[in-house]
C-alpha cells in the first residue's frame, strides 16, 4: 500500500477529539472534489459546532449575494424550501462554500496544506484556499459558470466507469460519437461525458456487461464539446479576475502538474470546464515530487479510491 490517503471519516474523528494526523514522510495535499458529494447534512451540523467552518460559510454567503437573490445559508439549512441538488446554480455555490469551509476548519485545527489539488469545479475551491483567487473572484467564477451551465442543463450527463481509460476508449469508439472521456480519476476509474440519450444507451450497455457504472449527478456534458457554446458568454462574464501566485502550491488537474496561479484567468476557468480532467496524472505528479499524503475536503470519499490507486501505481512504477 502506498503512503496515506486520509479518508473523509477522519474529519469526523478530529471533531470527536481523536488525534489523527498524517504520519507519512513528506508533504500533504488538500484535495477538492467536483461533483458527487452530499453536502447539506454535514454542513448543517458543522454550522452549529465548528466555528471556523461557520465563519467561512458566512463569508461565502456574502460573496455569493452579489450574484444570486437567495441566501446560501438558508438553502443549506433548508429554510429556502429547496435542495442544493435541485439546480446547478444552487449546487455549485453550495459545494464550493462547504469545501472551502471544511478546509478552513482543518486549518483551525492546525492541519495546513503544503499544496492543493482540485477536480473540475473543485479547482476553484483549491485556488481560493491556496490564495490564488480572492473569495470575491472565486465566487464570481463559480456563479458565472453555474449561470452559464444552467442554459444547457438537461442536455447531457456523465458516467463513472471502473475501467482504465484505454479500455473505456475502446468501448466508446463503438458507441455514439458524442461520448468522450471527461476525467481520468485513477488507473481503474474513468468518467465519460456526452449527450443525455447517449449516456442512457451507454449505461444500458454497461449493465448488460455487468459493469458497475455509476451516473454522476449532473445533467449536462461537462468536459466535452458540448461546453463550446458557452465560450462567448464565459469569455465576457469572467473578465476582470485578478489571480495571483498565492501562498500554497497549486497542482492543476487541467495540466496534470504544478501551475503558477497567476495565470488562473477567465480562459483557464473555461478550459477547466471544457478540457478532460487529468486527476490521475496530477496525483502521480504530486507523489513524485514529495507529496504522499492527500486529505479530501469532502464529507464523502468521492476521490479517495482513485487517489489510492494512483499512489499504488506510482509506488509500483
Image: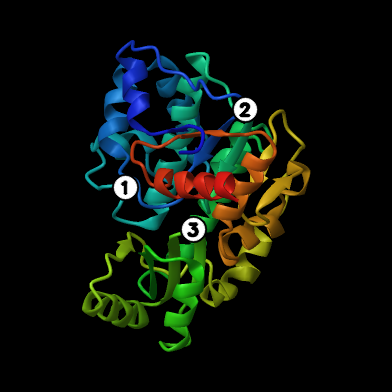
Which residue corresponds to the image point at 29% horizontal and 38% vertical from the top-left?
A: 40
User: What's the colour scheme?
Assistant: rainbow
Taking 221 as reference, is 231 left or right?
right
Which residue corresponds to the image point at 56% horizontal and 61% vertical from the top-left?
A: 273
Q: Nearer the viewer, mark 3 or mark 1?
A: 3
Q: Quadrant of the N terminus?
A: top left
Q: Residues within 10 Å of mark 3 (few under 14, many from 20)?
A: many
Badge 3 marks a residue whose secondary structure is loop
Q: Residues within 10 Å of mark 2 (few under 14, many from 20)?
A: some
Q: Earlier in the sequence, mark 2 or mark 3?
A: 2
Marks 1 and 2 in Cβ contact (< 8 Å): no
Badge 1 marks a residue whose secondary structure is loop
Q: Earlier in the sequence, mark 3 or mark 1?
A: 1
What is the number of the mark on residue 187?
3
Task: Give the spatial CA distance, label 2 vs label 3.
Answer: 23 Å
Q: Is residue 151 visible?
A: no
Badge 2 marks a residue whose secondary structure is loop
Q: Earlier in the sequence, mark 1 or mark 2?
A: 2
In this rendered view, identify the residue nearer to me: 303 or 40: 303
Indicate the position of residue 306 as horizontal and vertical percent values: 45, 50
Marks 2 and 3 in Cβ contact (< 8 Å): no
Task: Give the spatial CA distance, label 1 vs label 2.
Answer: 34 Å
Q: Is residue 19 visible?
A: yes
What is the number of the mark on residue 84?
1
In this rendered view, identify the residue nearer to me: 279 or 225: 279
Which residue corresponds to the image point at 30% horizontal and 44% vertical from the top-left?
A: 38
Q: Mark 2 = which residue?
A: 27
What is the number of the mark on residue 270?
none
Indicate the position of residue 64 as horizontal and vertical percent values: 49, 40
Amino acid at each position: 500500500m502506498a503512503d496515506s490517503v486520509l479518508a473523509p471519516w477522519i474529519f469526523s474523528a478530529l471533531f470527536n477529539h481523536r488525534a489523527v494526523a498524517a504520519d507519512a514522510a513528506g508533504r500533504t495535499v488538500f484535495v477538492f472534489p467536483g461533483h458527487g458529494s452530499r453536502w447539506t447534512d454535514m454542513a448543517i451540523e458543522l454550522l452549529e459546532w465548528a466555528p471556523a467552518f461557520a465563519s467561512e460559510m458566512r463569508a461565502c454567503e456574502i460573496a455569493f449575494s452579489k450574484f444570486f437573490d437567495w441566501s446560501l445559508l438558508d438553502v443549506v439549512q433548508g429554510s429556502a424550501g429547496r435542495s442544493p441538488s435541485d439546480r446547478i446554480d444552487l449546487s455549485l455555490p453550495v459545494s464550493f462554500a462547504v469545501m472551502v469551509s471544511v478546509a478552513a476548519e482543518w486549518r483551525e485545527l492546525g492541519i495546513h496544506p503544503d499544496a492543493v489539488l482540485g477536480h473540475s469545479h473543485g479547482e476553484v475551491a483549491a485556488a481560493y484556499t491556496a490564495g490564488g483567487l480572492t473569495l470575491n473572484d472565486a465566487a464570481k467564477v463559480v456563479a458565472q459558470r453555474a449561470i452559464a451551465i444552467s442554459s444547457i442543463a438537461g442536455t447531457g450527463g456523465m458516467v463513472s466507469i471502473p475501467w482504465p481509460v484505454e479500455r473505456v476508449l475502446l468501448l466508446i469508439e463503438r458507441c455514439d460519437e458524442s461520448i468522450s472521456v471527461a476525467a481520468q480519476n485513477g488507473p481503474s476509474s474513468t468518467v465519460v461525458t456526452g449527450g443525455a440519450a447517449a449516456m442512457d444507451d451507454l449505461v444500458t450497455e454497461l449493465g448488460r456487461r455487468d459493469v458497475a457504472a455509476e451516473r454522476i449527478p449532473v445533467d449536462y456534458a461537462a468536459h466535452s464539446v458540448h461546453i463550446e457554446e458557452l465560450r462567448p458568454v464565459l469569455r465576457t462574464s469572467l473578465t476582470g479576475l485578478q489571480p495571483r501566485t498565492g501562498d500554497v502550491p497549486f497542482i492543476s488537474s487541467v495540466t496534470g502538474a504544478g501551475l503558477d496561479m497567476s495565470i488562473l484567468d477567465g480562459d483557464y476557468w473555461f478550459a477547466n470546464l471544457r478540457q478532460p480532467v487529468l486527476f490521475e496524472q496530477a496525483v502521480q505528479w504530486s507523489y513524485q515530487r514529495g507529496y504522499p499524503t492527500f486529505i479530501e475536503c469532502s464529507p464523502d470519499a468521492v476521490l479517495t479510491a482513485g487517489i489510492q490507486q494512483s499512489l499504488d501505481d506510482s509506488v509500483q512504477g
